[in-house]
Image (cartoon, grey):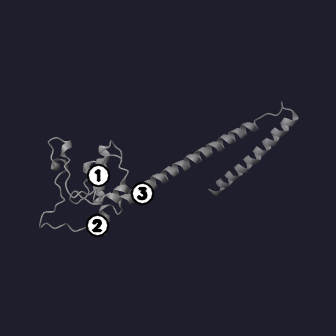
């Protein structure tokens, strides 16, 4: 399991005016920066554990030992957890305010929509590739049939010539049917 940065562990220490979605995006960016571009993939587990007492330490943890001469405030800014006496807590946003600030959707919904769109685009590309391959196969078959129609029977014995002529007749009938379908399509346009 990857080591989680102390900067990411600071649940409930969001910047002023920062909602949960902004906080999560910032934490994911920090994680990605510290893990050489690897995205955080344990969002479901984090959502379950984020308010668990083990992960939501009530006291500050001194992490300045990693950076000589640095203080806790140098690394993370002022700890906003203790509220000064007499200062009121800002009013909570209403549901409509919260959804407006996130573009009307939660991050997981937006992620789901992006994944759906990516899957749809991949499926459409695969269908187009399949159709292109099928058209190529049909074209190659027609070319083979035309080549077969050009086969001469004059140097063949009667038995072999009979089967070649029979096959040519089948190919011609198939082509007439195919061309008849194409002619019908032309008349519709």
Nearer-the-camera pick, 168 or 84: 84
Q: Which residue is mark 3?
A: 112
Tag 3's secondary structure? helix
Identified at 12% across, 65% down, the residue is: 85
Left/right placement of residue 14 relative to residue 148 reads left
Q: Which residue is mark 2?
A: 97
Q: Which residue is mark 1?
A: 27
List x then y, in percent, for residue 83.
16, 62
List x then y, in percent, for residue 152.
79, 33
Mark 1 or mark 2, earlier in chain: 1
Mark 3 or mark 1, earlier in chain: 1
For label 3, count other residues whose C-alpha is less than 10 Å away and answer few (under 14), some (14-19) or many (20+).
Answer: few
Residue 17 in which image quadrant: bottom left
Tag 1's secondary structure? helix
Quadrant occupied by the C terminus: bottom right
Nearer-the-camera pick, 189 or 98: 98
- CA gap, disc 3 and disc 1: 19 Å
List x then y, in percent, for residue 119.
48, 52
Identified at 31% across, 53% down, the residue is: 25
């Amino acid at each position: 399991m990857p080591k989680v940065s102390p900067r990411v562990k600071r649940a409930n220490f969001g910047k002023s005016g920062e909602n949960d979605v902004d906080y999560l995006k910032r934490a994911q960016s920090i994680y990605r920066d510290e893990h050489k571009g690897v995205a955080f993939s344990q969002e479901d587990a984090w959502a379950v554990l984020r308010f668990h007492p083990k992960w939501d330490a009530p006291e500050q943890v001194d992490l300045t030992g990693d950076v000589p001469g640095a203080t806790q405030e140098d690394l993370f800014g002022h700890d906003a957890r203790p509220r000064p006496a007499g200062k009121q807590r800002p009013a909570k946003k209403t549901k409509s305010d919260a959804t407006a600030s996130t573009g009307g959707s939660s991050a997981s919904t937006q992620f789901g929509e992006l994944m759906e769109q990516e899957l749809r685009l991949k499926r459409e590309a695969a269908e187009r590739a399949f159709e292109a391959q099928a058209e190529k196969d049909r074209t190659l078959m027609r070319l083979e049939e035309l080549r077969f129609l050009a086969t001469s029977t004059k140097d063949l014995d009667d038995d072999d010539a009979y089967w070649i002529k029979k096959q040519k007749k089948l190919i011609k009938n198939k082509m007439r049917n195919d061309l008849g379908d194409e002619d019908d399509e032309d008349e519709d346009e």
